[in-house]
Amino acid sequence: MFQNCSGHTGFSTAYNFIESSSQDGTVDTDVGRAAPLPDPKQGGDTSSPKGDDNVGKVESLFILAGQSNSWGLGKIADLSEGYFDYWNRYRSMDFRNLSFSFFETYQWRSDIYPYPLYNKMYTRYSGATFESLSSKFSGQHEWINSSSNFDSEFGQEIGIAGTTKNYVATEIYKQAYPGYSVSQFLSSYYEAGVLKFDGSDLLTNLFANVDSAVKNRDVNQIFFVWYQGESDSIGNRSVSYDKNLVAVLNLVRGKVKYLFPNAKLWNIVISIHSKPPTDAETFPAANWSRIRSMQQDVVLKTEGDTLLIKSDLLPLSSDGIHINSESQLALGECVGKLSNILALQKSPIPWGNRTYQCQITYKDAQKTGELFQ
């Protein structure tokens, strides 16, 4: 579960989650495909629409949680390579004028080497000295061994920042635990239908850190983005995944209501990829498929505050588990664009409009992450 995903790979064509198969992972939006969903706040320059006086006046908060794909194994170094020229708008994006704060609590497994430095908090404020994408987001992962391949990685935060730049202010808090099953986010959980009480408090701890890190409670909207489930295809964990995912979402609702009583909460579940890992002995295909189905079922059975983004058409890294660097950019853009859509919603989302596909599209020498239904 911990291989580096910095390699540039081809596009996966596996896609069997309700929609029919696609023949290519990259789509020209003008050919052979429905138009992407509109982005109500698209356009404008990269500066804050109301100036630097709004720094700290939070309009929207993104909480990214889950396991390694949530943490993100995209490599900052990839973005300077020639084959990333089709994402070059991020190289020139002026983060100094972006009302954007980035919070990250460093949490990693203690059973791998080199051992990490725990609980390192990084705070990125707009208007500081961050003049480039590299200076804004690199150095997030601090290891005792500075030569570790896990240094200077990114997840969805760059794409989210690029697609929410018209917000008055955006904060992103990211805290993920690579390799952990959903039961370890909960103090009590179900395993094969049996209620157990020997879980962990990872999610409770996350919100304790949110409480400490996000001082400003003037938040209009909160997007809880959950990207997790790969580890639950191991053994018999998949049997009760739906019950545990419901427990996760209920816990989030309670914590958000307590910490941010005036905010509107939207939950965004990112489905695990349609293509199961090649290690079928560790990750049985039947279990993998069950997790994906349960993720969708839980979303469709909510009261309309939870949506699903499918990752099926995003390129995987060579390990066959983690989405690669450009997929993290695209997924971040999809999450950001979905937040733009949800920001205009005043009522629960109807049953038929809760599932989306995130796909990389190519047009005018640029690639973007687009949402389709």
Image (tube, helix red, strand yellow):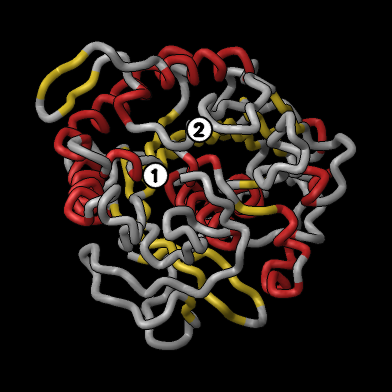
The residue at 31%/58% (across/down) is 276
Count of residue discs: 2
Check disc 2 and report the residue beneath it: 176
| Circle 2: residue type | Ala
Residue farthest to the right, as pictured: 129
Up the image or down, 309 lies above or below 27; here it is above
The residue at 44%/88% (across/down) is 31
How far from the left and from the top, in percent, is residue 216?
A: 63, 18
Distance from Cα at disc 1 to Cα at disc 2: 28 Å
Up the image or down, 313 lies above or below 151; here it is below
Secondary structure type for disc 1:
loop
Which quadrant of the rendered structure holds the C terminus?
Answer: bottom left
The residue at 38%/40% (across/down) is 228
Which corner quadrant of the image does residue 91 belong to?
A: bottom right
Check disc 1 and report the residue beneath it: 345
Of residues 44 and 319, the one drawn nearer to the viewer in this rendering: 319
How packed mark 2 is, by other alpha carbons closer than 10 Å (few <14, some 14-19, many 20 or more), is many
Up the image or down, 258 lies above or below 114; here it is above
336 sits to left or right of 265: right
| Circle 1: residue type | Gln
How far from the left and from the top, in percent, is residue 347?
A: 31, 40
- Mark 1 or mark 2, which has the lower sequence index? 2
Pointer 1 and pointer 2: residues touching (CB < 8 Å)?
Answer: no
Mark 1 vs mark 2: give the one in front: 2
Q: Is residue 242 visible?
A: no
The residue at 37%/77% (across/down) is 34
Of residues 252 and 83, the one drawn nearer to the viewer in this rendering: 83
Secondary structure type for disc 2:
strand
Which corner quadrant of the image does residue 135 belong to?
A: top right
